[in-house]
Image (cartoon, rainbow, N blue to C red):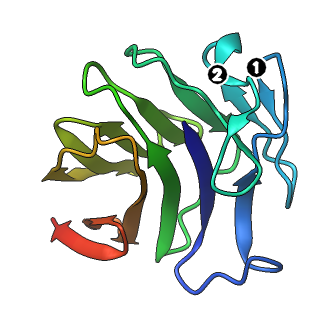
Amino acid sequence: MLMLILGSVNANLNTDLEVYYNFDETSGTTLTDSVGSKDGTASAGDILDSSAGILGTSGNFIGTDSDNIIYDGTIVTDYPFTHNAWIKSNNGAGQIMGLINKGANTEYSNILLQASQFAEAQSYFGGSNGKATYSVDIADNAWHMITGLFISDTNRCVAVDGLIRICE
C-alpha cells in the first residue's frame, strides 16, 4: 500500500507541494493531483482500489516490476526537493513500487522500493546520473515513511522512518 507526496524540503502541506496524491480514486489508472495539475498514471488498474491508508486511502501494489506511479511533464529540478511515500508491506518479493517524475529527454527522478532488500533515490538530469541505495527490510506489515532527498544534481539521500540512512 502506498501514499505519495513530492515537494520541497521545507514543505508546507498547504502551499509548498508540487504534487500530492491522496489515492481517493476507486478504479482506473489516473491519480488526481490534489495541489496542482500533475496527475499521475498508475501502471495497473488494480493499484487504485481504496485500500486503507495512513490518511484516508492508499494504493495497492502487488509487487511486480511494473507497479509504478508516473507523472510526466515539467520535471522538478529546483533543489533541494524530496519524493516521499508511506509504505506498508507484508511481501518482500519483487519491486513493490516506484514513484517516477519523468520529463523530456529521459530526465527523471524517482524512488524505488523493494521491501525486503532496498530503498533507492535515483535521478538523471542534464547528463548527471546517480543514485543512493540503502539496504532495508520493511516487509513487516507496518507503515514506514520512505523519502528520497535530492540535494543537488549529484547528491541524493535516502531516509527511512525520518532518519537519513545514506547519501551518495
Element at badge 2? helix
Q: Quadrant of the C terminus?
A: bottom left
Element at badge 1? loop
Decide if residue 102 is in sight here: no
In the rendered view, would you say 73 is above or below 81? Answer: above
Does 147 sit left or right of 121 as displayed? Answer: right
Residue 158, image quadrant: bottom left
Q: Quadrant of the N terminus?
A: top right
Closest to the observer, 47 or 6: 47
Closest to the observer, 8 or 42: 42
Q: Position of residue 18 (x, y in %)?
A: 72, 63
Q: Position of residue 32 (x, y in %)?
A: 85, 41
Look at label 2 and name its amino acid: Ile
Callout 2 crowding tier (Cα within 10 Å): few <14, some 14–19, many ≥20: many
Q: Residue at x 19, y 69 (%)?
A: 165
In the rendered view, would you say 33 is above or below 116? Answer: below
In the rendered view, would you say 112 is above or below 30? Answer: below
The tag on residue 29 is: 1
The mark nearer the N terminus, 2 or 1, is: 1
Whether residues under marks 2 and 1 lie with C-beta atoms below 8 angstroms apart, the answer is yes
Does 29 sit left or right of 111 as displayed? Answer: right
Closest to the observer, 153 or 40: 40
Whole-angstrom CA distance, mark 2 to mark 1, is 8 Å
Look at label 1 and name its amino acid: Thr
Q: Residue at x 51, y 53 (%)?
A: 85
The tag on residue 47 is: 2
Callout 1 crowding tier (Cα within 10 Å): few <14, some 14–19, many ≥20: some
